[in-house]
Structure formats: structure tokens, C-alpha cells
Amino acid sequence: MARRTLAVSTALLLAIAALLVVQWPGRSLWYDETVNAYFAGESWSAIWEWCTAIDNQVPLHFAALKVWGMGLGTGEFVLRAFSFFCALLGAAGLVALGQRVAGRASAGWLAAAALALSQSFLYAAFEVRAYGLALALFAVSSVVLWSLWERYADGARPLDRGYAARLALYLGLALALVYTHYTGVIALAAHGGYLAWRTLLAPSRRRATLLAHLGLGLALGYVPWMVALAGRDIRAGTAYAGRIPPDAALRTYVDFFAYGQHLLPEGSFPYAGAIAGLVIACGAAWAIARRRDPARLRAAALAASLTLVPLAGLVVMVYAVQAKLSGRHGWPAWLGAALVIGLGLAAFEPRRWLRWPVWIAALALVWLPSRAALRPVYDSHLREAFAYINEHAQDGDVLVLRDGTLFTAAEYYGAAMPWIGLPPDRLTDVERTLFFDEAAADLQALVAREEARRVWVVAWQGHIMDPQDLVAGILEVIGDPQPIGRPFGDVFVSMYTLRAEPRALAERVAGMRPVVQTPPDGPIYLGGYVVEPGPVMRGGIIHVHTWWQRGATVMPDMRVSVRLYNARGTFYTQLDQPPVAPWFGQEHWQPGSPVLSRFTLWIPAEIPAETLHVRMLLYDMPGSFEPLPVEIGTIEVLE
């Protein structure tokens, strides 16, 4: 029987490996992956500085990836292979865990199959981030913890060298887990929840001793990291203010288990709800089939704790502690959900006529989202973007990263020209905003130092730290945009041939004086212009810049309407929006600093060729003041 179990387990793991190999992605890394990939080739001191002084990540995955890269290189395939082998180790750990807790080999096989067929497992197996390693450590540490507790908790054996060895092994794996990803603490809370239930169910001095040893060991192991981060607020600037409703958070975590890092097309079958229903049904099936067996009740309790405690902890965290919602942070619950499925399906094993149809149907449901034509959440072609830029680069070219957090992508993919970030910060800070004076000064310094004739721009979610879109706003005034031969997914590449230096626009803006102020003391309009210097074609677009200064009163309901009229006053089109953008309200403006609000207007294709007036209307949605009309300029429309 043992040989058969080993043979089937080995065959299953080989099948999982083959399934992954045939789905090996050809896409480039997306931004978050480039961080880990970049540091795989950097020094130990750079990794330490990143983890302790810049980002809020723990260092073990960075260190493991660096050691892996020292021997095999840091190419995309090699770095993905590390996650691939970690994911296989996690599946193997789940096989062992299911077999031990259920007393049936089929429970482990079915649990591992359910995990391997899920889109979340596929994500972890190829993502150049910590989730594959975390899954492996969580699965294996769960096996060791089960063995430790079942062997020693009831006083059947003395706390001998075997106990010390098992305790040390678990503590090593558990500490490795919390040093791999900060959500590892939530995974260990699932272990703690199960052990607390076992202890409360049958209190004893031995069980209290085991809990004390585990708690003390974990606390002592985490003290060095607390010392390393002493005096630092690791949450500062990394998450938005506010609270995320529990139902929205829970739905996000369930969706990620079903779909991975993909978007479900509208109108598609709700696989996430069906898979959640499968998990619940499997839990009920195991509980009903084994309701008189205390050993199987313990299995159910462990599976429930591994599933529900991480979900509850994450929901509480994003609601009450830090509004940072990411479905991939639910990775500890993937293991628990797969274990519940394995236990429930194993309950059908005695019913020979029923078990295979049930097993196949359940596993097919978990697998079905892979056939749903899912779109990736982050369709980032960073490799292709930098390859295109390097291929078309000329002497005198420079590169602007919108924003500086893209330095890891620029370094990993080898940007072949001088570059700067705007703003230059190396970590996304949702409270950090680029303003005009800084942007113009830094861009002027780059252009002057390199005697630049062309400026390339790479952007990925650049609106977070550059909500005014100052990078494009400055360059479209002092340069002529050039066509880019292809798109790069959600990575945006643009290029401008310069005809002036940034200081020219800085001097122009500095010379602006107040034109009108929204009553009584709201935002001050400093002036505006149409960017395009010459005639435009019907069906084309124009860009309108308006410049503002913060007033004493924030007016969140104020709107700006940019409109086109002909000389006879005939209205053609308009675009209404808050000054700048809805996510960058006036409360974020710096007093005394000019603020840019860009408008992109389509010229109607059916209008006659003539001179059009560009006008602006300032108004307040509640109607607290009479609308204020302002003339901006004129454009010549051609056939």
C-alpha cells in the first residue's frame, strides 16, 4: 500500500509539473515582478536597504532568489523556474497533509489536484514573487505541525530529542514563512486557531506547554526583524486612507482563488461563486460522512482554520488597519480551500459507483475558469517596451520614467539611455505627488546635462504619483509627439522631439497672473492655452491646458467645462471635469504651486472648416455661484 501511495503521489506531481510546463507564460514580467528580478542581481546590502529602509517587504524571498540567480542567472525563465519548483513543493506538502489528516491517501491527491487546477496556483507557480515559496513553506510547516501535535500533545510520548527536533523544524519553517511575506503572520494565525481549538477542547498541562514553546519560539525568532524596523512606520504611504467593506474584500479574495490575476468578462458564468459553493459542499460532505469519528473532526477543524482564519484576518486588516486590498494576499486560504475540497471528495471514496463522477465534476469546476478567455489584470509588456526603445534610440535621446518606481524595470531590462524618474521616489507612495516646479526643474536638468534632442517616456500606473499628468503636459508643449509603432499593453510608451527646453514653459507659467477666482475664495484660474500650435483636422483632437492655484476654500463640487464654438456662437462640443481629476481634489494642491488641468477634446468630424473659439465655463454643481465664462483661445479647423 505504501508503494502504491508513493507511486500515485509521484505520478500526480509529475502530471502537475507537466500541466504547468505546457502553460509556461511567454509574457514579460510586470512591474511588481521586476522588483524581485532586479534585486536577484543586486548586492546583499542593496537587498537589506530595500527591505529595511524603503519597502515594507521581508527579505527571505529576495535572498533565496539571489542565491538561485547566483548559480543559474537572472533571466525571466530561470526566475520563474524558482517559483515553479516552490509550487510543486507546495503541492507535495498538500498531498502529505491531506493523507495525514484524513487517514486516506485520496484526500491528499484530490486536494493537490484541486489546488493545481486553480488559477491561483498557476499564478503562484510563475509569478517572480514570494507566493510560490510561501505556499511551499505553509504546506510543509502544516504537515510538521500536525505531526508534532498528534505525536506529543496528549502526553503519550516524552518531550525528548524527537520532540525538540520536530519543534525546531516547525519553528524554522514558520519563521521562514513570516520572513517570506508579511501576510505569513496570517497563515500562522490559522495554525494558532487550530491549536487553540484543540487546547480548549481538552485542556492539559502538556498542551499548554506545547503552545508556550511554539509561541515563545516564534516571538524570539521575529524579534530581530522588529529591531531592524524599529522607529519606522511600514504602512506610511503604501495604502490609501479609508476602509474597504468586508463583503467587497471577501469577494476579491474568493475571485482571486477562482481566476488568479485575471478579469472575468462581463456576462460570464460566475465561477467564483460556484467554486465557493463547492468548498462549502465538500466541507459538509466530510462532516456528514465522518460525524462520529473524532479523528476526522480534527481534520475538518484544521481545514476550516486554514481557510477561514486567513480570510477573516485579511478582511479585518483591510477594514480596520490598512486599506490595501489585493486578492493575491489570500494565498493562505488557497491551501485550506483545496484541503477542504480534498476531504469532501475523499468522503465519496467508499461509494465506488459515485466517486469518479463526483471527483471529475468537482475538479472540472475548479479548472473551468482557465477556459473562460480571461484577460490579465496587468497586461504589461515591459520587456517589449524597453526593447523597442533601445532598438529605436539615437544619440541625444533620454528617458523619463513616470514615475521613479519603474527604476527596477529600467535596470532589469537595460534601458540604453540616461533616465530619470518623475517623481524620483523608488517606491510608490500614494501620498506623494509630483508638482510642476519639481517636474520642470528635474526635466530641465536632464535635458541640459545630456544635450537631449528627444525624450522617451515610459509609464505604468503613473497617475498615482503624477495625477496632473505633468510629464505629458510639459513635453507636449515643448516638443512634437512622434508615432510609436505598436502598443505595449498597460505600459505606455511615448516620444517627443524637442523644440524648446523645459525652462521655456516654466518661465511662461511663472509669468501667469490670476485671471478669475471662483467666488468667494475658491481655486484661482491663472491662464490657459491650446497646445497645438497650428491648424487641426476635423475628427482630430486638441489638448487644452488650464493652470490653477489653490484658494482658501476647497470647492469639491466645482467643475470646468471646456467648449468649442464658432464665430457666430454656434456650440459644437464640450468636456466637463473637475479641475485636474476626481482623484486629485483641491485639498491635495500645494499652496502657491501652479496646478495643471489637461483636457483632450475631439473635433467633430461633421463641422465645417472654420475658426473655432475655445472657451471655458466655471461652475459649481449645487449652483452656489453664477457660471463664469472665460475665453482661452482659437483654433483653425481644416478639411
Image (tube, rainbow, N blue to C red):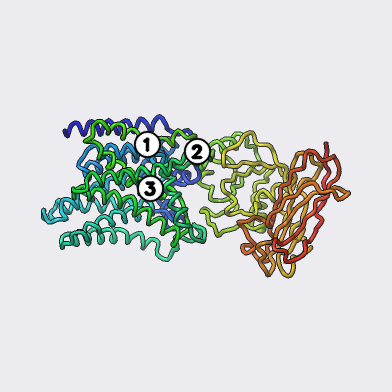
Classify mark 1: residues with Cα within 10 Å, few (<14), some (14-19) or many (20+): many
Nearer the viewer's eye, disc 1 or disc 3?
1
- In the rendered image, the vertical position of residue 551 relative to residue 59, given as above or below: below
Q: Residue at 32% x, 61% y: name it.
A: 223
Identify the residue position indicated by label 1 in the image: 117
Residue 509 found in image quarter: bottom right
Q: Is residue 301 left or right of residue 634?
A: left
Amino acid type of disc 1?
Leu
> Which residue type does callout 3 highlight?
Trp
Residue 500 in sight here: yes
- Asked if residue 392 is positioned above or below residue 204 in the image, the reply reads above
What is the spatial separation of the Cα atoms under label 2 and label 1, in whole angstroms? 19 Å
Where is residue 218 shown, x and y percent of the image?
Answer: 28, 58
Q: Is label 2 or label 1 in front? A: 2
**Residue where numbered disc 3 is placed:** 331
Q: Say few, some or many: other residues with alpha carbon within 10 Å of mark 2 (under 14 / 14 to 19 / 20 or more).
A: few
Q: Earlier in the sequence, mark 2 or mark 1?
A: 1
Q: Quadrant of residue 276?
A: top left
For residue 102, which numbered disc appears in the image? none
Marks 1 & 3, CB-CB < 8 Å contact: no
Look at label 2 and name its amino acid. Answer: Ser
